[in-house]
Image: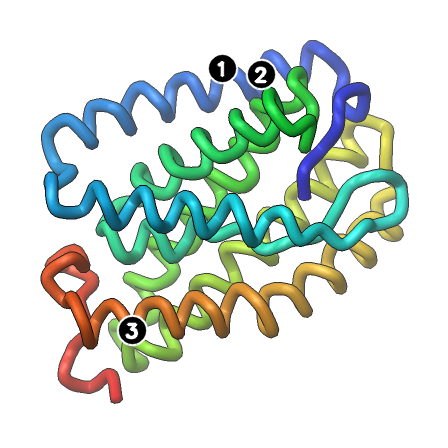
Amino acid sequence: MHIPDGFIPLWQCIIYYIIIIVVGYFAVRWAKTNLQEKQIPLLAVLAAGIFAIQAMNIPIPWGTSGHMVGAAIVAILIGSPFAGFLVLAVVLIIQGLVFGDGGITALGINIFNMGVLGSFIGFYGFKGLRSFISDIPAVFIACFLGVAIPAVAAAIELWVAGTFPLITGLYFMGIYHIIIGIVGEGVISTIVYVAISQVRPDLIALGTRVSNKSF
């Protein structure tokens, strides 16, 4: 899902940079007042894990790639989409600047897709789903959506930029990330959620902890 340099016109890149700067401002404000000290090691471990899973890229026609994202599970565990945004922003900045994975001019759109869309869709999808289904399937579906919808958004953005044909882009980005979302993101995120809820439930944000109907 990393978009390289040259795929998005510069004026559009600037728009995405403005969006993530605004979101980043509110994310930092959230972290200063809401992030608990005991959750910081968990954030670091999740960031390292996300960095590793995103290194497993599947090439997609026209030059982008398919991979897991990880933003949704961070947002769910920590209890805010801003947490997912901050982790993905750090990961994507390091990948872009140090490892050349994703473009520098396209860094804004990559953070927007994975850090903003992935986190907010995953978090609020989970919050909505758990009102009528148990937590475990809610985590699976929310994390799946946190990959699939940003992938579709990326295809549309690349079409708007004149890079991808819309239908073909939706087909390839959609199919690849539906599979990745089910086999990878959904399953792995659910395993992580269950494991932490069993071993250290105190690390999970109060509003997203496992309820009695989960198992």
Whether residue 66 sits left or right of residue 37 in the image: it is right
Q: Which residue is mark 3?
A: 195
Residue 214 to residue 124: above or below: below
Q: Quadrant of the C terminus?
A: bottom left
Q: Residue at x 27, y 57 (%)?
A: 77
- Residue 133 is marked as none
Return the x and y of residue 123 as percentages of the image width and height.
34, 54
Q: Which residue is mark 1?
A: 18
Identify the mark nearer the N-term, 2 or 3.
2
Q: Are marks 1 and 2 in contact (CB under 8 Å)?
A: yes
Q: Are marks 2 and 3 in contact (CB under 8 Å)?
A: no
Q: Which residue is mark 2?
A: 15
| Badge 1 amino acid | Ile
Indicate the secondary structure of the residue bearing disc 1.
helix
Q: Residues within 10 Å of mark 3 (few under 14, many from 20)?
A: few
Q: Rounded to the nearest whole Å, what is the CA distance between mark 1 and mark 3?
A: 37 Å
Q: Residue at x 80, y 25 (%)?
A: 7
